[in-house]
Amino acid sequence: MDMIPMTAAGYAALEAELKRRQQEERPRIIQAISEARSHGDLSENAEYHSAKESQSLNEGRIADLEDKLSRAEVIDVSKLSGNTVKFGATVTLIDEDTEEKKIYQIVGESEADVKSGKVSITSPIARALISKKVGDTVEVNTPGGGKSYKILKIAFV
């Protein structure tokens, strides 16, 4: 059983989603199924089939969340330090072609969100950055082609 690395914030977000799905979504869906049943013939009842599908999706996600939380290896980023890139690091990069500055935090897969600057530890950019130091240049194969970045800063916050 492989452990899943994640930050404390990522763990809290998964816990909150699990709680919401168990305490809000599950009762709402059960109520929808009950209401749809009262409409009669289930074989031609679109509301019933829709509610049952929602229940199946919700229960699947609950099982997925419970699995991830049980295998979580929570890493307190604020206690990390060093001068090399590792899980939890916030890395400031500069694109050597466009001179565009980018800031990424390396996080677990379940909490990755590129729009908010969080990249998965398994992503190509994170894999290229791991173990590098300030001043190093990294080559990353992205879907849009190869990119070259220079590491400007490494922080653990």
Image: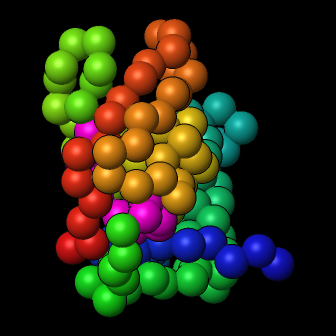
Q: How is the image coloured?
A: rainbow
Residue 24 appears in view: no
Is 99 contained in the magenta span?
Answer: no
Looking at the rendering, the stretch of residues picked out in magenta corresponds to 84-93
Please, which residue is most extreme toward the bottom here? 79
**Quadrant housing the C terminus:** bottom left
Q: Main secondary structure of the magenta part?
A: loop
| On screen, residue 62 above or below 66 | above
**Residue 99 visible here:** yes
Q: Single out the residue that lies furthest toward the front.
A: 135
Query: What residue is rendered at 17% in x and 23% in y?
Result: 100
State the residue in front, 33 or 91.
Answer: 91
Residue 87 magenta-highlighted: yes
**Left or right: 110 in relation to 116:** right
Residue 50 x %, y %: 54, 41
Q: Residue at x 33, y 35 (%)?
A: 150
Q: Position of residue 84 (x, y in %)?
A: 43, 64
Name the quarter where the N terminus is drawn.
Answer: bottom right
Residue beneath the point at 32% across and 89% down: 79
Residue at 52% across, 21% down: 142
Q: Is residue 1 left or right of residue 137?
A: right
The quadrant where residue 46 appears: top right
Residue situated in front as seen by the camera: 116 or 20 = 116
Q: Is residue 151 left or right of residue 138?
A: left
Q: Position of residue 106 (x, y in %)?
A: 41, 57
Q: Could you say where residue 72 lies in the image, as x and y percent from the top left?
A: 58, 80
